[in-house]
Amino acid sequence: MSSPDERREALKELFHEARGCVRCPQLAQTRHTVVFGAGNANADLMFVGEAPGRNEDERGLPFVGQAGKLLDTLLGEIGLARDQVFIANVLKCRPPGNRDPHPVEIERCQEYLFRQIELIEPTVICTLGNFATKLLRHDTTGIMRLHGRAEVRMVGPRSVRLFPVFHPAAALYTPSNVDVLRQDFRALPELLALGAPEQPPALVEPSVEDEPNSDPPAPPDAVAPGEAQPAIAAEVEAAPEPESEPAPAEPHPAQLGLF
Ligand code: SF4
C-alpha cells in the first residue's frame, strides 16, 4: 500500500503517459483532450463510466455535463462530494459523435483504467452502465439484470466490492430510471461501511515480525546529497513511449483534478 502522496504522484505520472496516447488513431485525431479522470487519489469509492462526451472532451474532466450534474446530486444525497471519490471512464478519449466505444478501443485503453484502480485501491467500484460493468466483470451480462446488486470480484490483483448502476446519461431523460438510480445509490454508504473485502493471500502485507530485516531497503539508485535526484534525472532522460506522441509541455490545470 502506498502513502497518499505516493498515490497522487503515481497517478500524475500515469496521466502524463496517457495524455499523449495515440493508440486509437481515430480518437487521437478527433479528441481535444485525454480525459484521464479526477477526484481523490485515496478514495474508497471509485466510479467508472463509459467515455467522455463533448463537455468532458472540451474541459478535460469527467462527468461535467448534465449527467455529471445528476451524479453530483446523487452523491450529495448520500452525503458525498466529488473530492471524496474518484471518477474515471473506460475510454479516456471521446468517440466522435458520442458513438459507442469500439471493442478494439476498449482493449487498447483498459490498461490505463486497471492501473488507476491498482493505484487508488478503492474498496467499492461503482460501474456506471453497460460498458464499465461488462469490462470489470469480464462478462456480457447487461446492466438491466445487474444494477443495484453488489458482489465481490477480482479486479486486477485486488478484490473489490463491485456495484453496477445505470449510467446517469442513460437515466437523464427517463424519470423512472433516475428513481432506480437514486434507489441504487442509497446502498453505497452501507457498502462502503463494510470496508475492503478479504484480499488474496499474495496481497496480504507481511507483518514486521515476518520480515527478515525491518530497515527500509535503500533505493537501488540512491544518490549522495548534492547529486541530481534520480526522479529528476529519469524525467530528463525518459524516452517517449512508443505508442505515445510527445506530450504538450504543460497540461491544462483543469485536466487533473486530483485531491
Ligand atoms: S487507448 Fe485510450 S487514451 Fe489512448 S487513444 Fe485510445 S482512448 Fe485515448
Image (cartoon, rainbow, N blue to C red):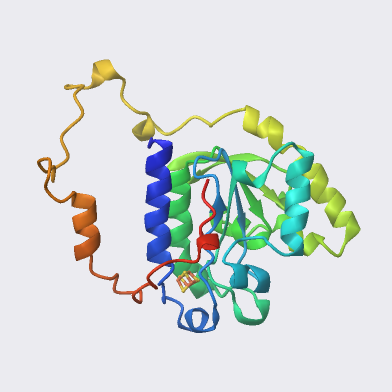
Horizontal side of residue 42 vs 210, given as left or right: right
On the question of residue 152 being in view, the answer is yes
> Which residue appears at 41% of the width and 72% of the height?
21
The one nearer the camera, 78 or 100, is: 78
At horizontal 69% and vertical 39% (from top left) the residue drawn is 80
Q: Position of residue 188 (x, y in %)?
A: 70, 38
Is residue 138 or residue 114 the one in the foreground?
114
Residue 71 vertical placement versus 211 (above, below): below
Can residue 156 be seen here? The reply is no
The one nearer the camera, 103 or 116, is 116
In the displayed structure, does residue 241 sit left or right of residue 65?
left
Front in this rendered view, residue 135 or 59: 59
Left or right side of 94 for 17: left
The residue sitting at 51% across, 50% down in the picture is 258
Q: Is residue 67 above or below residue 240?
A: above
* Residue at the far front in the pictured view: 226
Tell me which corner region of the image, top left, top right, bottom left or bottom right, holds residue 76: top right
The image shows residue 61 at horizontal and vertical percentages of: 59, 62
Direction right: furthest residue: 175
Which x, y percent locates residue 151? 62, 40
What residue sits 63% from the left and 33% below the top? 192
| The image quarter in which residue 75 lies | top right
Q: Is residue 137 above or below residue 64?
A: above
**Vertical side of 203 occupied by 243: above or below:** below
Image coordinates for residue 195, horizontal then vertical, percent: 57, 29
